[in-house]
Image (cartoon, coloured by chain):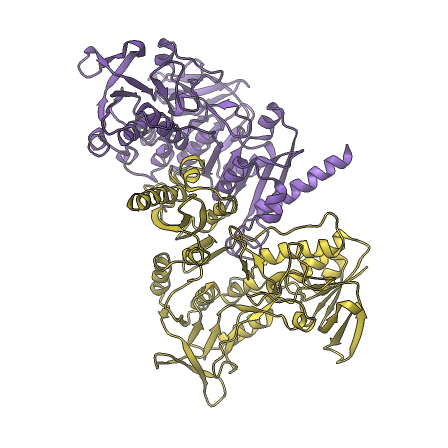
Chain colours: A purple, B yellow
Amino acid sequence: MRLAVIGGLASGPAAAAEAVRANPEAEVILYEQGPYISVGSCEIPYFVADQIQDASTLEVLTPEQFEETRGAKVRVQHRVESIEPDKSRLFVESLVHGSRHEEYFDRFILATGARARKLGIEGEDIKGVFSVRGLEDAVAIKSWLEPEAVRHVVVIGGGFIGVEMADAIRRRNLRVTILDPQGRLMRGVLSENMSTPLIDAVQASGVAVRAERATSVEADEMGRVASVRTDKGEIIGCQSVIVGIGIEPRTELAKAAHIKIGMTGGISVDDQMRTSQRHVWACGDGIEVPRMVDGKKILWPLSPIARRTARVAARNAAGVKPADRFTSVTPSVAVKAFGIEVGSVGISGEEAKDAGFDVEVVQIKHWSRVSSMPGAKRLHVSYVVERGTGRLLGGSLVGEEGAALRADVLVPWIRGGTTVKEIAEEMDLVYNPPIAPAMDPLRVAAAKAIRAISESKAKR
Amino acid sequence: MRLAVIGGLASGPAAAAEAVRANPEAEVILYEQGPYISVGSCEIPYFVADQIQDASTLEVLTPEQFEETRGAKVRVQHRVESIEPDKSRLFVESLVHGSRHEEYFDRFILATGARARKLGIEGEDIKGVFSVRGLEDAVAIKSWLEPEAVRHVVVIGGGFIGVEMADAIRRRNLRVTILDPQGRLMRGVLSENMSTPLIDAVQASGVAVRAERATSVEADEMGRVASVRTDKGEIIGCQSVIVGIGIEPRTELAKAAHIKIGMTGGISVDDQMRTSQRHVWACGDGIEVPRMVDGKKILWPLSPIARRTARVAARNAAGVKPADRFTSVTPSVAVKAFGIEVGSVGISGEEAKDAGFDVEVVQIKHWSRVSSMPGAKRLHVSYVVERGTGRLLGGSLVGEEGAALRADVLVPWIRGGTTVKEIAEEMDLVYNPPIAPAMDPLRVAAAKAIRAISESKAKR
């Protein structure tokens, strides 16, 4: 069996390696148009901040190391132009030689991933404007910021990439302004109240957060970025612009092969990671996945999910019986920036209402450790709870310590449909003064939700 | 309805307050023989270490504050001598006046707690020998250690109290020796391999851990502790001895009232916290509780469980319908000492085997954060997994960071019978370089368990 894996940045290498493990007799070839495979893009902010010094650290394995240790063949700087699964072939261009040829495969895995979303405004291709996606971006940003000419950087987008990059650039002692249309940070996962402690910390560090939308980017006479214009008519002088407004799946190859694309814009797959075309599987940031609780299809382009879907796609493409199945994703995200930890799991209040749930949204603040202990900090916890059943559907935590890892506890709770009554009354979370109070903030929030639900019932 | 709660340190105040909440018409009286109620004994090591300066911090509420805010009456320095539930009365001695009288009650809650276990060796009542249980102990230890005469302290017992106290005393720049019969630390919850990183850190701080049993304590001519003799014939000169070898339930009052005591030595209760005597409930450190997985009765004298059982006992004694029920305890413990965090949840390999489970015990070490990030540390994780089902029965974590709060995630997993396959393949724990690697140590350990089980099956 010959198996082609197309796309080599995150899920592709995972899928290729897993396919060889599952079926050592298969010949597996991994195609990647760029010069690298297996790149950790989540480390980019820490590389920019000089917390990670060496760019090669971001490259988890070189193509040679990968071939040696994983047993799949690697073709870097090879761009797959099209796949024809019904004819068991693909067309590929070698970007080194410029040559084109066809190759025959029995099965295909699309791991074509996603690209940074563009602003769609004038000037966004000017020198000094960067997105945050690949190793090239990381190196380009860092070399642009290093000369002394850069004093002020505008970060467009208040999502987690924007927040992390703002922190990284601030650590280089440059001035930073974050533009977000609503002047919010991480609004995909934090309610307005919950984002306040983060915004406070960001502003305390000297970074401005402005409720403005960029409308154009302008260059100086050298063709380098000089300013950003906003929808409020402001002109913000700056020497670099970082764009972090999310990603969009790369689906050109799939579309050309008549593979079904979902409502989210991601490649549509079933629970075995099969696309609508026979002999074609897909995985990684380019596909849509069902979320827990209601099965709604979403894009969730984070590395652990890329690996999970890669594993299922690879094992099934390699012919493992019984078939591996993907259940659902429990959306989870954590950020540590500006001395604040943020953790979020499940769905937000807004998403829950959109999905038709009748929910109670509660928020508490409580101590991260026993309050009399040195180092105890206030931790803000918010829960989204279904009124009728008391099930936890989502939760977020914000605080100087103990927020990110506590979010992990929400994963089994939300995935398992655990009720706030069980959480408040039966979950024996660890207790010790330097670690957590006797009534953990996670249980305090559950107790508050119980009271809120019972009060809202009493009112009806 | 008149309700007597006997014992005022941890579960007693919780029960009294909950009973008033559940039945505001009940007259609830809380008896405590000492001068304080509502004392946080877990904070004692931090008070001894001067991390908490003020002894009054350990007293969560004064009797007056409690009466005002909780609505129950408090009788401190009142020792209940006996209860006669069939005659609806108790006999109580006022320790201030020396007077005795009887009082009439419809219902009783025993919250008599536990006392520090004694060594049962000669000399253990010499001045300068302390156990670690109440506020009086805390104050006595601190004033004994403050004069310059104390240079070396022997801590007897390598459990979590012993480790925490050794750390506290070390922070006072005194010499410390821990005696444990097996030269182990936290052996109730950590396997020998898992305890190594903790022992290394303890020894690196200059504290000796000796595999010896104390056989007697000896005094100087002033009647103050001068040395500890051990079963190896050694004489260890010291100016103080701290005994932390566990607790034993106080059951005198229960026994005198012909209330059934369980195999563990704790008061036996049903899932409503009823004792074997009508109209008598019990809660707190003095009772035995069923553990998760197999329902075996254990003593688990930690504050969160004291509160849980207090709540159930109080609500049922107050007449709430339908009755509140206690399911089971998921034993969990966390410690932070000597720069090391320890977390443990569920049952140990030994306990699992004793209970008849066929288990695989695995251990891994993996990074607490992405390995290239500053501050990333090795985290040791051990799992106890049932071979046939793959269910996680217990787990422990040891490391410089990220061990204690990660243990919380094990609580719902162990309680819910989650399999290592689900943990490895489907648990979307948070990922971000400064927080956790893409494959969290908790999932790496699960993957190792899957391989170990499959290898052990292959061998059979």
- Depth order, front residue of B240/B425: B425
The answer to whether A47 appears left or right of A248 in the picture is left
Residue reaching furthest to the bottom: B221
Mark yes or no: residue B151 visible. yes
Asked where in the image residue B65 lies, by quadrant, the reply is bottom right
Quadrant of the snapshot with the C terminus of chain A: top right
In this rendering, the answer to whether B249 lies above or below B312 is below
- Depth order, front residue of B248/A430: B248
In this rendering, the answer to whether B86 lies above or below A323 is below
Residue reaching furthest to the left: A97
Q: In x, y percent, where is residue B360? A: 37, 50
Q: In x, y percent, where is residue B27? A: 80, 60
Q: Residue at x 46, y 31 (%)?
A: A160
Q: In x, y percent, where is residue B268? A: 62, 63
Quadrant of the snapshot with the N terminus of chain A: top left
In this rendering, the answer to whether A123 lies above or below B8 is above
Asked where in the image residue B34 lies, by quadrant, the reply is bottom right
The answer to whether B173 appears left or right of B22 in the picture is left
Q: In x, y percent, where is residue B452? A: 33, 45
Mark yes or no: residue A239 visible. no
Please tell me how many numbered marks the rendered image carries: 0
- Depth order, front residue of B307/B238: B307
- Depth order, front residue of A295/B167: A295
